[in-house]
Structures are given as C-alpha cells and as structure tokens.
Image (tube, grey):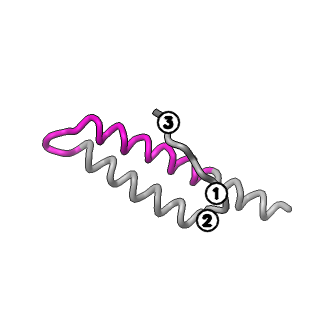
C-alpha cells in the first residue's frame, strides 16, 4: 500500500530530519532479533513517503530561488 504524501511548504531541514529518523527506524527494524515483516513494510512505506517529501522540499526550494 502506498503512503499518501503531503508536500505543501515543507522545509528541507524538517524533511531531512523526518527522513533521517525514519531511515534509522527502518534500519533498527531490519536488525531486530525477531523481525516483524508487517512493521518492516510499514516503516518502508513511511520512509518512501518521507523521501518523496524531501525531494519535493528541495525542488520547492530550488524553484523558489530561480524565480
């Protein structure tokens, strides 16, 4: 299931912090002594959505500087 991505006015620093936190969470779940596939899948979906928000924030920042 795809996570819904909201990209309205996200600052790149906030998006990066969100992405880093979710990446660390995903990594922790992958290394868990007893893996939980449902939790890993949910964390991956959240990480994927955070990556999309980060890309959108950088694009928004970039287009803002060009205009």
Element under disc 3: loop
**Looking at the magenta stretch, what is its main secondary structure?**
helix
Quadrant containing the N terminus is top left
Residue 3 percent across, percent down from the top left:
50, 41
Q: Is residue 26 magenta?
A: no
Circle 3 or circle 1, nearest the eye: 3
Query: What stretch of residues is rendered in magenta?
Result: 31-55
Label at residue 20 = none
- Badge 2 crowding class, 10 Å Cα cut-off, few under 14, some 14 to 19, many 20 or more, is some
Judged left or right of residue 31, residue 10 is: right
Query: How far apart in space, not on screen, are marks 2 and 3 (Cα)?
Result: 23 Å
Upstream in sequence: badge 1 or badge 2: 2
Q: Identify the residue under disc 1.
A: 57
Q: State if disc 2 and disc 1 touch (CB < 8 Å).
A: yes
Give the residue pinned by disc 2.
11
Name the quadrant containing residue 35: top left
Q: Residue 58 location, x and y as percent?
A: 65, 57
Residue situated furthest right in the rendering:
67
């Amino acid at each position: 299931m795809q996570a819904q991505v909201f990209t309205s006015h996200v600052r790149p620093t906030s998006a990066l912090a969100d992405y880093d936190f979710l990446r660390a969470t995903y990594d922790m779940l992958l290394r868990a002594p007893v893996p939980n596939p449902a939790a890993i899948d949910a964390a991956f979906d959240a990480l994927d959505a955070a990556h999309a928000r980060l890309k959108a924030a950088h694009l928004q920042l970039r287009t803002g500087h060009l205009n």
